[in-house]
Image (cartoon, grey):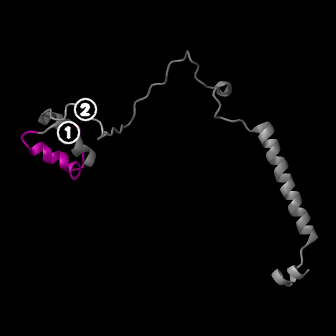
Amino acid sequence: ERYHDTFMPGWRPERRLAIWSAVGALVSCIWLALYLRFIYRNDRSDSIARWTQLEGHPTPEAEPVSFTPDFMLVFDNPGVEHGDEDTEVVQGSMERLLLEHTDPESFLRLKALMKQEKTTKSAVRTAVVQD
């Protein structure tokens, strides 16, 4: 009683509220146990047997689905030596990197390299990644 008057003066616990809170917590725990036991299925299993029951599931004998990507991102790993860093790049190769509808303000480093007389593959890779 002393602690109650010190920490919560003027408030008395309601037995009805405490009972309904306990019932709600119990129902929630029972629901979670039933869900985990009868409904939930782990989708991280090693076999794909669960997914074969789905309609439209590709079988191993089926033809693989082919698609054409809209665009592809390719990144150069600067830690890998390609062995062709000093190989000269011709002007036409760099022009093929730029599309007709390329924004005039993009690929400025590559365009600067195109104005040079000689350019190496290493310089082109660096310019494209930086642009």
Say which quadrant the N terminus sits in: bottom right
Q: Residue furthest left?
A: 117
Q: Amino acid at mark 2?
A: His
Q: Nearer the viewer, residue 56 or 116?
A: 116
Q: Is residue 21 left or right of residue 106?
A: right
Q: Nearer the viewer, residue 100 or 29?
A: 29
What is the x, y in percent for residue 121?
A: 18, 36
What stretch of residues is rendered in magenta?
97-118
- Give the residue drawn at x 14%, y 44%: 113
Vertical order, 3 against 91 (above or below)? below
Callout 2 crowding tier (Cα within 10 Å): few <14, some 14–19, many ≥20: few
Q: Residue furthest right?
A: 15
- Residue 18 visible? The answer is yes
Q: Tell me the residue that label 2 is attached to.
A: 82
- Give the residue drawn at x 19%, y 50%: 108
Q: Earlier in the sequence, mark 1 or mark 2?
A: 2
Say which quarter of the image contains residue 41: top right
Q: Tell me the residue that label 1 is attached to.
A: 122
- Residue 131 visible? The answer is no
Residue 103 located within the stretch drawn in magenta: yes
Q: Amino acid at mark 1?
A: Ser
Do tag 1 and tag 2 residues touch (Cβ < 8 Å)? yes
